[in-house]
Amino acid sequence: MSRQMLIGQRVMMVFAHADDETLLAGALIAKLVSDGHDVKVLCLAPGDDDRIRRLRRACVDLGVSAVETLRFSESPMWPDDADETRKLPTKHLSPQLSLVPITELAYKVAGRISEHAPDVVVTHSSYGDYGNCDHAATFCATKLATESVGDEAIRFYSLGWARWMVGGNARLMRLSGRSIRRMGPDGSFDMWLALIRSKSPSITIDVSAELGVRRKASRWYGAEIAKGPLPMRLLERVPLILQRSFLGKARLRVEMAPEGFDHMAGL
């Protein structure tokens, strides 16, 4: 199903890291802004001051009206990576996002939701998009936060991805010797289990016309892209006309909505 949003909606987008708003949802954000909606971004583990500065610059390019940040730190993808992280001098500065109790995260996110009173809340997928434990934790916390606010009019959506893209990424991780059953700093995140429990996206929005805006914003994250997985690095280099095959459709799953809400009319 292809959708446009109802007119003049207040949208809160909740992300784990600075760059997620652009690389995962930049075209969707630009589409919502171009359609007249007010989009605010909350980032839970944005990184250091320089990365926060670049987050704000990217959000200006996307048309975001306000950016808020919490100061949790980014979790390593696998336990082996955590061993290396423990050697870093910054290990004590703030707790890793995926290790923070979900109720604590949800309390902080709920405060922002109550303050801004959005019509729509959007966050990561339940399986962490490409298996990122921080993304999965952000989904769980945002879901609990949205439910706890008690506003029955809020619609809550998670990002969705074509199964062939998710499955292909999982196969690449396995081929490289990485487990998708033991992920995160303590090995407790099981991407495979989260994936089989998830349901397919139910809403599709054409964002192909906004890929140019997304590419402009993504230039603030050259360092992150260069350190990212090979599929990401390749995708960011191909011409926009080829990117459309992979990123031209934004997919969303309905997680919470008022009873009887007509998703044919908009998000």
Image (cartoon, rainbow, N blue to C red):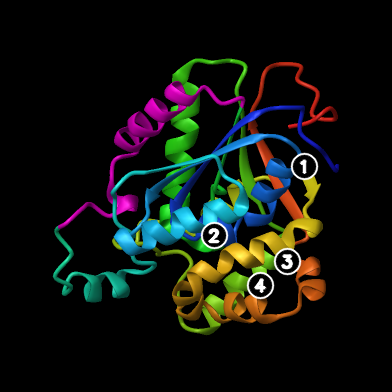
Q: Quadrant of the image for the C terminus?
A: top right
101 to 54, vertically: above or below: above
Amino acid carrying label 4: it is Gly
Foreground mark, 1 or 2, reads: 1
User: Which residues are the magenta region?
Assistant: 93-119
Q: Percent x, y for residue 178?
A: 45, 77
SS of the residue at dot 4? helix
Q: Looking at the rendering, which quadrant does residue 243 occupy?
A: bottom right
First in sequence, mark 1 or 4: give its number: 4
- The residue lying toward the viewer, choosing from 99 and 71, is 71
Q: Percent x, y for residue 218?
A: 57, 66
The residue lying at 46 percent from left, 64 percent from top is 181
The answer to whether residue 30 is left or right of residue 263 is left
Residues at marks 1 and 4, CA–CA distance in whole angstroms: 22 Å
178 to 140, vertically: above or below: below
SS of the residue at dot 2? helix
Residues at marks 4 and 2, CA–CA distance in whole angstroms: 13 Å
Do tag 2 and tag 3 residues touch (Cβ < 8 Å)? no
Specify few, some or many for label 3: CA neighbours under 10 Å numbering under 14, 14-19, or 20 or more. few
Amino acid carrying label 1: it is Ile
Q: Quadrant of the image for the N terminus?
A: top right
Residue with the mark numbered 1: 203
